[in-house]
Image (cartoon, grey):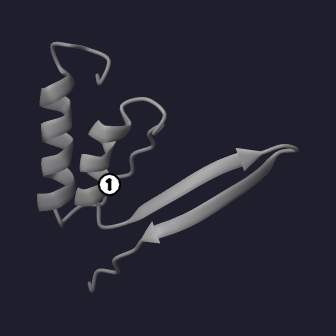
Amino acid sequence: MLFSPTYKKLSLDKLEKFLSEDKKRTYLFSVSTSAFREDIKRWEKAADNLMFARMEEPMKLYLKIAKGNQRSG
């Protein structure tokens, strides 16, 4: 949806609202920051938990937890 001129802003706004306001559910999104880096920063800011993954040769996967928020149940 981010590639669509028609739906890009609507998609950015809705997902940002879900991430920042809906604390009853947990949402998992996977995005590539190489496309629309500045737009995706809005979601990063709104998210309670934020993880970054990268892969290097030969098939080594690295995971970095940049922000974590535990909810009490």
Front in this rendered view, residue 10 or 72: 10
Image point 73% across, 53% down: which residue? 61
Q: Is residue 54 above or below residue 68?
A: above
| Res. 58 image quadrant | top right
| Res. 50 image quadrant | bottom left
Left or right? Give the position of 19 relative to 62: left
Q: What element carries label 1?
A: helix
Query: To which residue does mark 1 refer?
Result: 44
Image point 39% across, 46% down: which residue? 29
Quarter of the figure with the C terminus: bottom left
Q: What residue type is labelled 1?
A: Glu
Quarter of the figure with the N terminus: top left
Residue sitting at the far bottom: 72
Image point 62% across, 61% down: which residue? 63
Front in this rendered view, residue 21 or 26: 21
- Residue 36 lies, in percent from the top left, at 36, 31
| Res. 40 image quadrant | top left
Front in this rendered view, residue 49 or 28: 49
Q: Is residue 55 above or below residue 63?
A: above
Q: How many labels does the image show?
A: 1
